[in-house]
Amino acid sequence: MATPVLEKTEPAGSASAASPYITVTFRIRRFNPEVSAEATWQDFQIEIDPKERVLDGLHKIKWDLDGSLTFRRSCAHGICGSDAMRINGKNRLACKTLIKDINPEKPITIEPIKGLTVLKDLVVDMEPFFQAYRDVMPFLITKDTNEPTRERLQSPEDRERFDDTTKCILCAACTTSCPVFWNDGQYFGPAAIVNAHRFIFDSRDDAAEQRLEILNDKDGVWRCRTTFNCTDACPRGIEVTKAIAEVKRALITRRL
Amino acid sequence: MSTTETTASGIGPVEGGSVHTVDNPAPYIEAPRKRTGRTPRSTRGNFEMYGWLFMRLSGIVLVVLVIGHLLIQLVLDGGVSKIGFAFVAGRWASPWWQVWDLAMLWLAMLHGCNGLRTVINDYAERANTRLWLKALLYTATVFTILLGTLVIFTFDPNIR
C-alpha cells in the first residue's frame, strides 16, 4: 500500500444511498409593480447539491416552484454578465457562486443589484449604467485614417498595458456596489471608467484626451472615494480601483 | 379562437393575472437616473482635479502643522496648564508662529470645507438640500477664515 490511493472507507452500497442533496432556504427579494408597490422577502426551500450554483437554485425555483420569479441570465457561465445580483449582501454573478461557498446553513438572501430601478424581482433597468458606458466612447477612434486598410499592429507590451480592463463583461456588479453611485447615479461609475481606461491606455487609440476630458467632469473620476467595493465585487477579478487611480494619474500628469 | 377570450393586445387571459387593465394601468416607474433637462450639465475645467489634489497636499502639510501644534500646546513645557493669554501673546510675537497658525487656519478650514462639500454631494439627495447645506457651509467657512485671519494680524498683546 505504498501508492497513495483514494480509498473508499464506506461500502459501495451506502455511498450511493447517501444523497448529496441538502435543503437550502433561498430568501428572495420579490417585487411586482402590478401587484404591489412594496418589495417583499419570500422564502423558498429547495433540495440542492451544495456543489451547484446559486443560478441552479433559481432555476429550480422558477421551473418547479414559482414560475413568476423573474431574473436575467443568458450564458450561465460567467461570460455574458446578465445575472449579477446581490447574494448575501455582496454583488456576485449567480452563475459563478457555488452554494457551498456561501454558507448554506443559513438562508441565502438574493436581492437585485442596488442603485438601479427595479423593474421586477431581480431585474433592474440597466439603462443609466449603459448610458454612462456610452458616454465614455467605448470604441476605437483613430486620428489619421478611419479606413481599415491594414492591421493595426501593437507590441505585446502595449497590449499588456490595458489587459486587465479588457476583461470587463459589463455585469454592473462594480457600479452597483459603489456607494457614490447609489446616491444620485450621476457618477459615471467604475464600469464606465474601466472601459474608458481600456481605450485611454491603448496605443492604437487617439482619443485618450477626449475621454480624459469626459472623466474630468464633476461626476467623473474625482468622485471616486477609493472604498474598493468595486474591486471586491468584480467577478472577473479586475483591479477596478487601480484602473480608476491610473486614470486620475493620467489626468494629473497631463494637466499639470 | 371562439372559446378563448382575447384582449385588444391579442394576449389571452393570464392565470392569476394582473389587476391592471387599459383603463387602470400599472403605475409608471420613472427612471430616477434618466438624463433629463434637470440633469446637471457636464462641467469643463479642472476644478474637481485641483480640489482632489488640494486634499492630498494640504493633508500632508496639515499632519506636520497639527501634530506640531498639539505637541507645543498640550505636551511640551508643562502641557496644557501653561496655556494662557500670556502664552498666546508670547508666541504670536514671532512672525514664524503667526505664519504657522495662519497656514494651519487656512489649510484646515479649506480642507474641511472641501471634505464636507464632497460629503454633501454624496449624501444630499435633492438639489435644494444641497444648495442650502453648501450655502451654510461656505458662509461658515468664509466667516471663520476671515475672523481668524483678522485676529492673527491685529492681535494686540497690550489689550485691557
Image: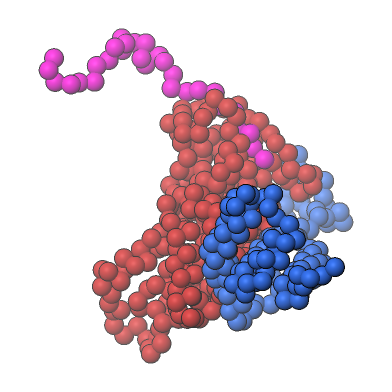
Chain colours: A red, B blue
Residue shown at the point (63%, 49%) measured from the top left = B79
> Could you tell me residue A191's position as x and y percent?
52, 61
| Residue sitting farthest toward the right | B23
Using the image as rendered, state which of residue B24 and residue A21 is in the foreground: A21
Determine whether A62 is above or below B139 in the image: above
> Could you tell me residue A166's position as x and y percent?
40, 63
Residue shown at the point (74%, 43%) measured from the top left = A39
| Residue sitting farthest toward the bottom | A144
Residue A207 position by quadrant: bottom left
Q: In this view, does A196 lie to the left or right of B106?
A: left
Residue shown at the point (54%, 62%) measured from the top left = B64
Verify whether residue A83 appears in magenta: no
Q: Is residue A31 left or right of residue A51?
A: right
Using the image as rendered, state which of residue B138 and residue A149 is in the foreground: B138
Residue range in magenta is A1-29
Q: Where does the N terminus of chain A fall, quadrant-wise?
A: top left
Determine whether A106 is above or below A123 in the image: above
Verify whether residue A10 appears in magenta: yes
